[in-house]
Amino acid sequence: MNDLLNQLGLVGDWLTSPKQWRGAEGIPQRLLEHLTYSGLSLLFAALIGLAFGLLVGHTGRGAFAVAAVANLARAIPTFGLVVLVVTLAGLSTTPVLVALVALAVPPILINTFEGVRGVDRATRDAARGVGMTEWQVLARVEVPMALPLILLGLRIAAIQVVATATIAAYPGLGGLGRFIVDGLSRNDYELVVGGSTVVVVLALLVQVAFTALRRVVVSPGLRVSVSRP
């Protein structure tokens, strides 16, 4: 027990050390790199997942493709995908982004599709009955009612990307994973646990941000319709 407390104390000293908060290898710079990978990946994944999820959910065409994506997502090995893409495309930021986007698209696509398709048919028919166009039905009826599931998919993808972006360090890139990789290579316990702690805190902050966003943009009557995982 005393050894554990001593180790935790050393990690605390590492996190509060001024030298860890400045320079090219400091926490702010690594955090910026991590957020860059994560933010760009989530942006591209959202553009793809939302577009196809809304289209397939509204029209009902291509549902088999969504099911195929869902099954494929369960079989993709995260680290293996990154290594494969980097091996084929070379060591740069782009291959890592491609791998992270591929991992983030499925939860966004699936939850968007399920949210739109789950809207009551009578509600859609009533909207059409008052003269709404198909675009208006989607934008004014289906999307607002599907918003809890859409945000859930985005939240799952965001947390997954933030956690997975640590493996960007294995092919030689930066980010918070650099602390973990370097710490393992040096047998530096403080560096490994310190870097892992920062990643965990970042993931928790993402969770809090999406929870707050959900309270702002989703009407109270719809919040209870989606259970929190």
Image (cartoon, rainbow, N blue to C red):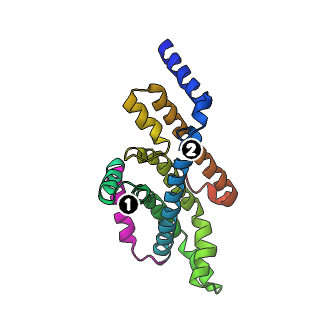
The reply, left or right, for residue 104 in relation to residue 23 is left
Q: Quadrant of residue 144?
A: bottom right
Q: Which residues are magenta?
A: 59-78
Residue 138 makes an appearance in the image: yes
Residue 76's place in the image compared with 21, above or below, is below
Q: At x 39% / y 32%, what residue is drawn?
A: 184
Q: Position of residue 115 (x, y in %)?
A: 52, 65
- Between 59 and 108, the one lying in front of the other is 108
Indicate which disc residue 29 carries.
2
Q: Amino acid at mark 1?
A: Ala
Majority secondary structure of magenta residues? helix
Q: Amino acid at mark 2?
A: Gln
- Between 143 and 178, the one lying in front of the other is 178
Does the magenta-highlighted stretch encompass residue 67? Answer: yes
Mark 1, secondary structure of its residue: helix
Hey, which residue is sitting farthest top in the picture? 2
Query: Label 1 to label 2, Cα distance in Å?
Result: 35 Å
Hey, which residue is sitting farthest front in the picture? 23
Q: Position of residue 201 (x, y in %)?
A: 57, 39
Q: Residues within 10 Å of mark 1 (few under 14, many from 20)?
A: some
Indicate which disc residue 199 carries.
none
Q: Residues within 10 Å of mark 2 (few under 14, many from 20)?
A: some
Mark 2, secondary structure of its residue: helix
Does the magenta-highlighted stretch encompass residue 179? Answer: no
The reply, left or right, for residue 16 in relation to residue 81 is right
Residue ID for mark 1: 70
